[in-house]
Amino acid sequence: MEGKVLRVREVGDPILSTKCKKVDVNNINYEVIQDIEDLKATLDFSEGFGIAAPQIGIDKRIVVIKVDKEKCSYEDAEDVPVTVMINPKWKPASEKTNIEYEGCLSVPSIRGKVERYKKIEVNYYNEKGEHIEKTVQGFLARDIQHECDHLDGIVFLERVTGHDGFATKEMINKFDLRNKK
């Protein structure tokens, strides 16, 4: 089955403020698999490292993550193959946090400083309905927290900290803001 590249919904679209419905993991049917394939195709077409179902207009708790560390400017990024997470849940695995600029496919060109846990425990189901639990850290932990926020109707703009919390992608690159706290 091949996925379609769908339009990424931008901030202001009501679906981005919707708490998404759980997927029945005992019934991962054709429709759910097609949604997953569309998420994968749309993510591949974008410059992002993760995408959540509501970002392409789907009211389901599904996230797809794929990280190419060569294209990622975060120092602690690791390569992550295409990972489908159905009904993901996470909790902190440590109290340590950090503040980094985040971007989002649904908020083009704006970046914001967001505090996230550095290490989390995540559990989810894959597209075969298998339950997976693991501990992740660094950029992957940030990415999962960001995408899970989408499933709860939260866009990173709501989590930005500090009076100097926003910048454009161009200014971050121009002034190397990513490495300055």
Image (spheres, rainbow, N blue to C red):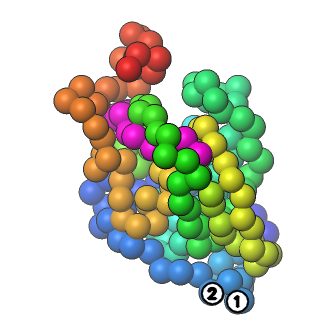
Query: Which residue is tagged 1?
Result: 27
User: Given the image, on which type of amino acid does mark 2 rest?
Assistant: Asp
Tell me whether the residue at label 1 lies in contact with that at label 2, contact meaning CB atoms closer than 8 angstroms. yes
Where 45 falls versus 64 (above or below)?
A: above
Marks counted in the figure total 2
**Where's the C terminus, which quadrant?**
top left
Q: Is 17 or 152 nearer to us in this picture?
A: 152
Spot occupied by residue 135 in the image (x, y as percentages of width and height): 68, 53
Residue closest to the far left:
163
Query: For this view, does 15 lie left or right of residue 43?
Result: left
Disc 1: CA contacts within 10 A as few (<14), some (14-19) or many (>=20): few
Q: Residues in magenta?
A: 109-119
Q: Main secondary structure of the magenta part?
A: strand
User: Given the image, on which type of amino acid does mark 1 rest?
Assistant: Asn
Q: Is residue 4 visible?
A: no
Query: Which residue is tagged 2?
Result: 24
What residue do we see at 19% from left, 30% from top?
A: 163
Residue closest to the far front:
95
